[in-house]
Image: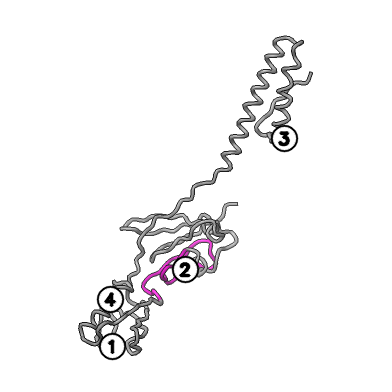
Amino acid sequence: MQECMEIYPSNITNSRVSSELEQCTNTPAEMSNYPVKKIVLSALQFLRCCAIFFLVISESMCSGWSRPVITPPVIKQDTTLGPGDIFDVRVFNEESLSNTYQIAPDGTIDYPLIGRVTVAGLNSQEISELIAKKLVEGKYLKNPQVSVLVKEYKSKKVHVLGQVKNPGTFPFQDNMNVVQAITMAGGFTPIANENKTTITRKVEGKEIIIRAEVGKISKGEAPNIFLQAGDIIYVPERVF
């Protein structure tokens, strides 16, 4: 008579389970001439085989489930300008009123016709509306179409630290994301743990930490993360 052998979780394979189950299912039918003790023992072994089989099936199903993607909180970006920031002003069909400006230390620019204008603390949309309003109030233009495009935020920075080739502080840009910041810092070092990158950000006086799986982001497997001025990006060392 062929007896069922014990199967341990450490050496289970699908073919092994199928083989052992076949042996287990055949064994009881062949044991009518053996003592009751032998039959009971074989029955217990058969039940154990079944239990292990269902354990293997359930584990394989669980391993196929994907982990939920944790997305960072959506936070309104601070795009206001400050001293040192550079932007273009364009007025439709008015070349003399279109130029590039840098905000002075006192937060102002010297604009044609309307003179000194305080723009620090405003975003690009608010600056364009302010200039248009003053041009109308001064009766220089009736319906000016003004647009403002930020070229460089010198008053705002992002910091990239840890396992990047050129860690340091870099100028913040509109719609800047974590991949761009890592690129500005020269990319990762060979021992960087790319998917453990963190972004430390101040929100309403409190610090929050956002996990950025940059390795997955670069492969299109996770959404990119947009930065805010003042963000601190840290890339840890990979543990071998």
Residue 216 place in picture, x, y as percent: 54, 57
Residue 187 place in picture, x, y as percent: 55, 66
Q: Amino acid at mark 2?
A: Gly
Q: Give the mark nearer the N terminus: 3 vs 4.
A: 3
Is residue 169 a member of the stretch shown in magenta? Answer: yes
Residue at image location 73% in from the left, 17% down from the top: 29
Q: Which residue is identified by label 3?
A: 15
Q: Is residue 123 left or right of residue 38?
A: left
Q: CA distance from mark 3 to mark 1?
A: 83 Å
Magenta stretch bounds:
152-177
Q: CA distance from mark 4 to mark 1?
A: 16 Å
**Quadrant hosting residue 174:** bottom left
Q: Amino acid at mark 3?
A: Ser
The residue nearer to you, when weighing 196 against 12, is 12
Q: Relative to 12, is 222 above or below?
A: below
Q: Relative to 22, is 162 above or below?
A: below
Q: Secondary structure at mark 4?
A: helix
Q: Secondary structure at mark 3?
A: helix
The reply to whether dot 3 and dot 4 touch (C-beta < 8 Å) is: no
Circle 2 residues within 10 Å: few <14, some 14–19, many ≥20: few
Q: Which residue is identified by label 1?
A: 112
Q: Give the mark nearer the N terminus: 4 vs 1.
A: 1
Q: Residue furthest bottom?
A: 96
Q: Is residue 1 left or right of residue 204?
A: right
Q: Which residue is identified by label 4?
A: 129
Q: Which residue is identified by label 2?
A: 168
Q: Give the mark nearer the N terminus: 4 vs 2.
A: 4
Q: Residue furthest right?
A: 1
